[in-house]
Image (cartoon, rainbow, N blue to C red):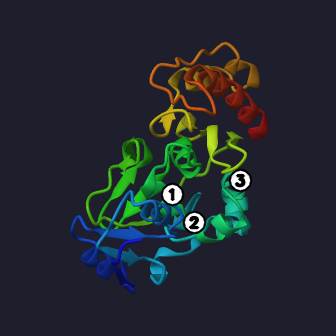
Amino acid sequence: MQTFAYQTPASVADAVRLAQGADARLIAGGQSLLGSMKLGLIEPASLVDLGRIAELKGIRRDGAALVIGAMTTHAEVAASKDVMQAVPALVAVAEGIGDRQVRNRGTLGGSLANSDPAADWPAAALGLGATIQTDHRSIAADDFFKGLYETALQEGEVITAVRFPAADKAAYVKFAQPASRFALVGVFVSKGPAGVRVAVTGAGACVFRVKALEDKLAAKWAPESCDAVAVPSKDLNSDLHGSADYRAALIPVLARRAVIAAG
């Protein structure tokens, strides 16, 4: 691994200042970044570690919404009584990520900022219509995910928290790759004040919504509403784990199971 400077800011303002410049990288849990560095895929001149910034951690209720700090770990989300009471589907998302080591190091904000095409948190954020809060603005989940490892974040911008609205019904079901537990396909469904939302991860360059499923479920919230929906395989991922056609066929099947799980 190459040499690099290591910065440990104590505030968001300091982190933003240190993160300016193309050769600096913010690091949260490091579950993806450090692996990429070891493989020589990226060579940052400086790492800005967010781990000591207290204001980026924690879980709180805000009316009907749930606000989770960006540096809150997956394990902390999974163990939170507030999360279980407000949006229990998020507990299931957090519990299904990686293994115990990954859940204790990986963070909500790091996962969203990385926007891995098979990650679980992007499906939860888009599936609930969450709002990603940064050091200077709020970004709707619908506007946040732009493509393969690409988001709306600007250079040096720091995710501070994610605001998840409560839903009347919500659930996440994924068909996991056995070794990594990343989603070959994962589907998050919700029904609430903002209507019906269906978000899919693992199947495309980044998380996306499936309007055909949303329309069917809005007309009738029932598992069978997913049965007649055919998802086009064009532009979906195809690899040794599953073809684009295979992933397309999985989406309505997993949506059906998610609706059953949501009740």
**For the residue labelled by badge 2, is the local secondary structure a helix, a strand or a loop?**
loop
Numbered badge on residue 111: 1
**Residue ID for mark 3:** 96
Let me know if residue 5 appears in the view.
yes
Q: Of the residues shown, which amino acid type is indicated by label 1?
A: Ser
**Dot placed on the residue nearer the N-terminal end, 2 or 1:** 2
Nearest the camera: 64 or 106?
106
- Residue at 33%, 65% in the rendered image: 43
Residue named by callout 2: 106
Residue 43, above or below 233: below
Distance between the Cα atoms at labels 3 and 1?
A: 14 Å
* Whole-percent x, y for residue 174 in the image: 69, 40
Mark 2–mark 1 Cα distance, whole angstroms, equals 7 Å
Q: Nearer the viewer, residue 184 or 239?
A: 239
At numbered mark 1, what does the secondary structure look like: helix, strand or loop?
A: helix
Of the numbered discs 3 and 2, the one sitting upstream in the chain is 3
Q: Is residue 193 left or right of residue 225?
A: left
Amino acid at the residue labelled 3: Gly
What kind of element bears circle 3?
Answer: loop
Mark before the other along the chain sequence, 3 or 1: 3
Q: Residue at x 52, y 19 (%)?
A: 233
In the rendered image, residue 211, in percent from the top left (x then y), is placed at: 51, 24
* Picture disc at residue 261: none
Tag 3 near tag 1, CB within 8 Å: no
